[in-house]
């Protein structure tokens, strides 16, 4: 991917909130770029099935100490089915499924059209599931672990049977059909049980930054954040070389626009962190830049009203001076491409260098409650600093 970004594009590689990588500034040799990536195994098994590979797992699947089961085998089964069968190729590229194995490291705030979350009851492993929401929502029902694949396929088939062409997401279908009707039809295809009073517990949001013990004793994974999710080829090559030298030759990307280097021996952890930071990645959760996300901005997107990447760097420097590291999302337009969830604080661009400030509020849709309009970056930093010092927000 580093070679392709240099040879066929401008050398900019960005991590996304779907735990993917994207190459920006692609020139005229698109076919050659795609061929090189497919040759490296970075693509679908069936070309028409590319858009439906929208399945999110924990970045620590299979190695997380809190997991109830290893989700990777079931994920591979689901992905093979949706790619192989043409009827699923009609799903929107936005139609999203989450498979949560109970890991400590899991993105639980992104809404999905279908989510499945592992739990145990009377010694039996089961999967709670819900439609158009998150694993921390109240589930619609549950199935036995062995029925997970069947449930996903049944939900996708029922959606395609009932949805009109303009209804691309589960929330669109639920606006017209009751969830009770959908569950009744699903129960004809897979054995569903009504859920007891169970809810998925939220997790810490910083387990993707720094070193954390894995399930296997003596090993850790190391999480590193590229500045605002943007890597250059040297960073990516360097991280890959570290994975070769100290890990299992794999890198895992996260929905926090960061990467994990798994299966590092305890005694090598400090050296891996030192070298990652030499590459320009951060492994310290207390740094403002590691808690900040920004879309491509006006330098990479025609819809953006501001240079969000540049403004985020300025804001991070100001907050570093104040000694604070709040979680902030900078969005160049209302589409919120960089964050599928609602961040604690969101800056929505209204003009170059100027933003409206929102704070997350469960009672408010979208970005939350509007706090102030048309702020400069300096004004934002001062306001966030004052808020952090307020006893009401302690």
Image (cartoon, grey):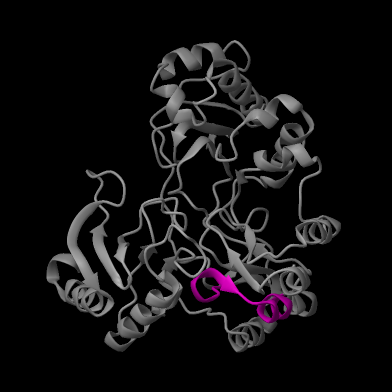
The C terminus - image quarter: bottom left
Q: What stretch is highlighted in magenta?
A: 224-239
Q: Position of residue 391 (x, y in %)?
A: 13, 70
Q: In this view, does 74 lie to the left or right of 160?
A: right
Q: In this view, does 22 lie to the left or right of 37?
A: left
Q: Position of residue 336 (x, y in %)?
A: 41, 54
Q: Can residue 327 be seen in this view?
A: yes
Residue situated furthest front in the rendering: 28
In reply to whether residue 169 is colored magenta, the answer given is no
The N terminus - image quarter: bottom right
Residue situated furthest right in the rendering: 39
Identified at 20% across, 55% down, the residue is 370
Location of residue 17 with respect to 219 vertically, above or below:
above
Identified at 35% across, 58% down, the residue is 343
Identified at 45% across, 42% down, the residue is 111
Given residues 249 and 168, the one toward you in this image is 168
Location of residue 63 with respect to 9 vertically, above or below:
above
Location of residue 349 with respect to 363 vertically, above or below:
below
Q: Can residue 286 be seen in this view?
A: no
Q: Position of residue 106 (x, y in %)?
A: 52, 53
Q: Is the magenta stretch mostly helix, strand or loop?
A: helix
């Amino acid at each position: 991917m580093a070679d392709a970004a240099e040879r066929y594009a401008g050398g900019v590689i960005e991590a996304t909130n779907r735990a993917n990588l994207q190459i920006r500034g692609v020139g005229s040799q698109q076919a050659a770029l795609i061929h090189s990536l497919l040759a490296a195994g970075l693509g679908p098994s069936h070309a028409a099935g590319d858009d439906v590979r929208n399945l999110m797992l924990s970045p620590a699947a299979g190695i997380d100490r809190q997991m109830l089961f290893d989700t990777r085998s079931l994920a591979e089964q689901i992905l093979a089915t949706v790619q192989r069968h043409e009827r699923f190729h009609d799903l929107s590229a936005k139609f999203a499924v989450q498979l949560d194995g109970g890991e400590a490291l899991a993105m639980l705030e992104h809404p999905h059209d279908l989510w499945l979350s592992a739990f145990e009851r009377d010694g039996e492993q089961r999967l709670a599931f819900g439609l158009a929401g998150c694993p921390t929502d109240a589930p619609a029902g549950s199935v036995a672990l062995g029925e997970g694949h069947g449930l996903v396929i049944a939900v996708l088939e029922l959606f395609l049977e009932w949805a009109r062409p303009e209804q691309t997401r589960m929330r669109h279908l639920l606006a017209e059909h009751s969830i009770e009707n959908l569950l009744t039809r699903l129960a004809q295809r897979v054995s569903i049980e009504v859920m007891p009073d169970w809810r998925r517990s939220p997790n810490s949001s910083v387990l993707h930054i720094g070193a954390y013990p894995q399930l296997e004793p003596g090993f850790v994974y190391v999480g590193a954040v590229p500045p605002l999710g943007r890597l250059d080829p040297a960073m990516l090559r360097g991280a890959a070389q570290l994975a070769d030298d100290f890990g299992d030759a794999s890198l895992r990307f996260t929905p926090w626009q960061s990467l994990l280097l798994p299966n590092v021996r305890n005694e090598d952890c400090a050296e891996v962190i030192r070298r990652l930071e030499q590459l320009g990645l951060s492994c310290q959760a207390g740094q403002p830049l590691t808690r900040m996300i920004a879309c491509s901005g006006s330098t990479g997107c025609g819809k953006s009203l501001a240079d969000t990447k540049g403004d985020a760097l300025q804001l991070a420097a100001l907050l570093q001076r104040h000694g604070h590291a709040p979680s902030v999302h900078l969005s160049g337009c209302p589409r919120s491409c960089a964050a599928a969830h609602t961040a604690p604080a969101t800056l929505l661009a209204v003009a170059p260098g100027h933003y409206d400030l929102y704070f997350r509020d469960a009672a408010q849709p979208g970005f939350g409650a509007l706090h102030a309009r048309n702020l400069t970056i300096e004004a934002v930093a001062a306001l966030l600093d004052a808020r952090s010092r307020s006893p009401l927000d302690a």
